[in-house]
Image: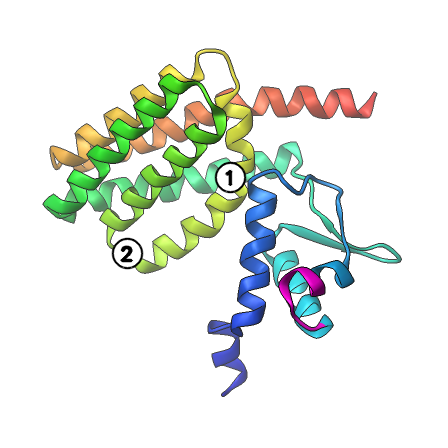
Amino acid sequence: MSSLDTAVHPAPARSRLVSGVRQDISDGRLSAGTRLNERELCELYDVSRTVVREGLRQLEGEGFVTIEAHRGAVVASISYQDAEHLFEVRGALEALACSLFARRGSVDCKRALARATTRTAEAMESGDLATVLAAKDAFYDALLAGAGNPELEAALRLLHARIRLLRRYSLSADNRYASSLSEITAICEAIVAGDIEGARRAGEHHVAQAARAALPRIFDELCRDSM
């Protein structure tokens, strides 16, 4: 196997470790600044130290981990500027996904998106943040599947792992559940109607509103931490 093949198709052990650590970070089980102990990761994932180090380097390249001298790997923090940049990229890519879905999404994919929208509404009625996050994940899964572009899907999936951290800020803002539901409902309606430009605008608006809800909360938290 060539080095290119290895880069495109990471070894199963490393892929399992990277996926697990990435998920723990995006779910909030590993918070910013937490040190990642190589020996503990070896035992937890039943892999060699070489695999752990390769996996941590991959996570560093993805922005999830920082490798510091004399300390090793720690969970990376997201600065205010990082958050701004993530929302900018997310807005452009999700708007594209929405427009592609409206242009060429199948009836089955549109049904799946409508079901995911309904389940998100039900989750928001429960008021449980973890349930809402899971429902929103399912909505984005349906959105990406309907867009029908594997390259875009791969880029957004990796981005969403980091965005999931920011979603906790946006969804905890006052009245954000109702606003978010209204926004994704507009996305779904435009896609079902085949309204390409309307779907693009709805996707762009949804991300802009999420940024508007999250960024002030991130700013306030950073200010408190610096005092």
**Between 168 and 134, which is closer to the camera in this rendering?**
134
Distance of label 2 from label 1 (alpha carbons): 20 Å
Q: Is residue 195 visible?
A: no
Residue at screen point 47% across, 80% down: 5
Residue at screen point 44% across, 11% down: 175
Of mark 2 and mark 1, the one earlier in the sequence is 2
Q: Position of residue 52 (x, y in %)?
A: 68, 66
The answer to whether 142 appears left or right of 221 in the picture is left
The answer to whether 38 appears left or right of 156 in the picture is right
**Between 52 and 201, which is closer to the camera in this rendering?**
52
Quadrant that contains the C terminus: top right
Q: Which mark is residue 18?
A: none
Q: What span is in magenta?
A: 42-48
Q: Position of residue 144 (x, y in %)?
A: 31, 47
Q: Is residue 125 visible?
A: yes
Count of residue discs:
2
On screen, residue 59 above or below 165: below
Residue at screen point 65% across, 38% down: 78
Q: Quadrant of residue 216?
A: top right
* Residue position for label 2: 149
The answer to whether 119 appears left or right of 75 in the picture is left
Task: Give the residue type at disc 2.
Answer: Asn
Dot 1: what SS? helix
